[in-house]
Image (cartoon, helix red, strand yellow):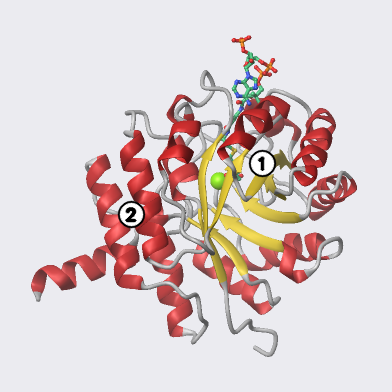
């Protein structure tokens, strides 16, 4: 336990990863309200939207409108995805604090998700990274399929490290290890994280775990054992990737906060208000929150 962090930062990716896969359009004002409720709950970083092709991901077509609709709170950082220069050029006027370039540890997923090879993606990202930094915007990198690929199956730690090194080489400042399809288990996650930690300091790595196989909390705990203290989570457990069929949402923010509260690890997040945010967006989508903690606390409120 000695390396356990005393404080953890959660980046809520619900407005982006959570909603990108929804078939029915979600109103821009509802997306903005979700961001407002997340910041009211104490989230200090929120992944708001992505500047990708609206033909590929129609749900994110209102990216600039969402960025314009949010009332920013001092001390909160707003991140957006940018897969290429076109995305960055559209994003910059909307004043993101951080942009995310997203590569994959698997060739097949790279092709399906961003229509190019891993090597081509790195070439595309290089000028994006440079221009973002020149504009004073922090650059985060996401590494998809670090624990397995929906098309290629097993992914080795060597494959992970190869792309980590490439991301580092073009100046990506932060590396998020992503389990796109939720197949990772704790020791494998540690092995992938350790490869990221060979090239990035502890403060610049994070975990992004989809909970498809119910392993995400265990995987976060395994990362805490390494001292990792930043994770992407999604309120209400929303989400999935349109190019990873069957993959469910990210680990629910409520579930992670509940676990961290129990461990005595600070997040600065008010769980009750987070549950409100999860209930709000789930209501908009016409379903119950996927979050077990969200459901339990809502049931407790209803009974009181
Ligand atoms: P492409 O078709 O190869 O792009 O797509 P292109 O450069 O050949 O351009 C084709 C058309 O797209 C052109 O328009 C461009 O202008 C337009 P047309 O002339 O046909 O009218 N275009 C754009 N429009 C808006 N914004 C842009 C943009 N770029 C080109 N930025 C591209 C390549 C990367 C754009 C496409 O494959 C794409 O948008 N992919 C996005 C996929 C995506 O969003 N996936 C989900 C997010 S990643 C994720 O969820 C994983 C993560 O959560 C971690 C994890 O869990 O693993 C981060
Ligand atoms: Mg994801």
Q: Residue 153 has which mark?
A: 1
Quadrant field for ligand 1: top right
From the image, state whether disc 1 or disc 2 is nearer to you: 2
Question: Does dot 1 land on a helix, a strand or a loop?
Answer: loop
Q: Residue at x 66, y 41 (%)?
A: 153
Cα gap from disc 1 to disc 2, whole angstroms:
26 Å
Judging by the rendered image, the residue that carries numbered circle 2 is 290
- Which residue is at the front of the view, 185 or 276? 276
Give above or below for 193 relative to 239: below
At x 67%, y 29%, the residue is 89
Please give left or right for residue 162 compared with residue 182 in the image: right
**Secondary structure of residue under mark 2:** loop
**The N terminus - image quarter:** bottom right
Residue at image coords 40%, 51%? 35
- Observer-nearest of 287 and 151: 287
Specify the quadrant of the image occupied by residue 2: bottom right
Residue 61 at what x, y percent from top left? 47, 26
Q: Is residue 71 visible?
A: yes
């Amino acid at each position: 336990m000695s390396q356990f962090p005393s404080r953890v930062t959660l980046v809520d990716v619900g407005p982006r990863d959570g909603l990108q896969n929804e078939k029915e359009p979600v109103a821009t004002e509802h997306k903005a309200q979700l961001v407002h409720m997340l910041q009211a709950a104490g989230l200090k970083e929120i992944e708001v939207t992505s500047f990708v092709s609206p033909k590929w991901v129609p749900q994110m077509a209102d990216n600039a409108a969402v960025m314009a609709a949010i009332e920013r709170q001092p001390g909160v950082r707003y991140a957006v995805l940018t897969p290429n220069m076109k995305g960055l050029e559209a994003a910059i006027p909307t004043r993101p604090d951080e942009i995310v370039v997203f590569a994959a540890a698997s060739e097949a997923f790279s092709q399906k998700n961003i229509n190019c090879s891993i090597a081509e993606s790195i070439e595309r990202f290089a000028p994006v990274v440079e221009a973002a930094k020149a504009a004073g915007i922090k650059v985060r990198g996401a590494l998809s399929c670090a624990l397995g690929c929906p098309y290629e199956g097993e992914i080795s730690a060597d494959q992970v490290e190869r792309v980590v090194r490439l991301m580092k080489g073009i100046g990506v400042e932060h590396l998020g290890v992503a389990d796109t399809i939720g197949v990772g288990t704790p020791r494998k996650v540690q092995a992938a994280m350790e490869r990221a930690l060979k090239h990035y300091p502890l403060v610049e790595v994070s975990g992004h775990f989809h909970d498809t196989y119910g392993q995400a909390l265990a995987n976060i705990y395994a990362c805490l054992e390494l001292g990792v203290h930043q994770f992407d989570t999604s309120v209400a457990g929303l989400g999935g990737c349109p190019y990873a069929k069957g993959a469910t949402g990210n680990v629910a923010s409520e579930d992670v906060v509940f676990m961290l509260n129990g461990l005595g690890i600070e997040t600065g997040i008010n769980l009750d208000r987070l549950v409100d945010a999860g209930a709000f967006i789930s209501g908009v989508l016409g379903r119950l929150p996927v979050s077990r903690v969200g459901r339990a606390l809502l049931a407790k409120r209803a009974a009181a």
